[in-house]
Image (spheres, rainbow, N blue to C red):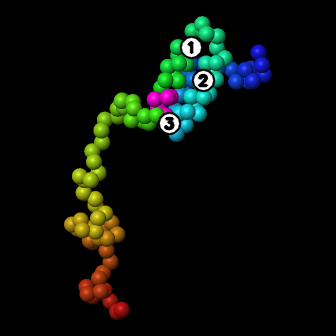
Amino acid sequence: MTVLHHIYDIPSEDELAQLVGAATPHFALQIRGRVASYLDRLPPDHPRQAELRRHLDRLDELAVEGEGARTPVPDLPPRPSLATQTDPSAPDAPGMSRHGGTATDVGPTPDAGGGPH
């Protein structure tokens, strides 16, 4: 075994899943190269050959097709749009000043007899 093979041993299934699972289209080919080097180290009859080939196929697809190639699996319920909610800090909201406080929070106006100017 060479020093290179000793230092860069083939990662466990969990480590490989972390490496491949974090791939983005921009880095998919670089990660694919690393996985291909792991595959090259294995003997042809090694049980992990199929796993590594699946990862290579996924990375090829990701590099060419991008993130949209996979069907997203939602893990959170959809959130309501903020566009449909009233923004209380908007200047034209009833009873609100331009600074986000209510009309009663604003100091005296010049025409309200606020004292000498």
The secondary structure that dominates the magenta segment is helix
Q: Which mark is residue 41?
A: none
Report helix, strand or loop for mark 3. loop
Q: Which residues are magenta?
A: 59-63
Q: Position of residue 53 (x, y in %)?
A: 53, 18
| Cα gap from disc 1 to disc 3, whole angstroms | 23 Å
User: Which comes before the other along the chain, label 1 or label 2?
Assistant: 2
Does the image show residue 75? no
User: Which comes before the other along the chain, label 1 or label 3?
Assistant: 3
Residue visible at 33% across and 66% down in the picture = 100
Give the class, few, some or many, for how many residues have Cα within 10 Å of label 1's Cα (few <14, many ≥20).
some
Q: Amino acid at mark 1?
A: Gln
Query: From the viewer's perspective, is residue 78 above or below residue 99?
Result: above
| Cα gap from disc 1 to disc 2, whole angstroms | 10 Å
- Residue with the mark numbered 3: 24
Q: Position of residue 23 (x, y in %)?
A: 52, 33
Report helix, strand or loop for mark 2. helix
| Cα gap from disc 3 to disc 2, whole angstroms | 17 Å
The one nearer the camera, 33 or 103, is 33
Q: Which mark is residue 49?
A: 1
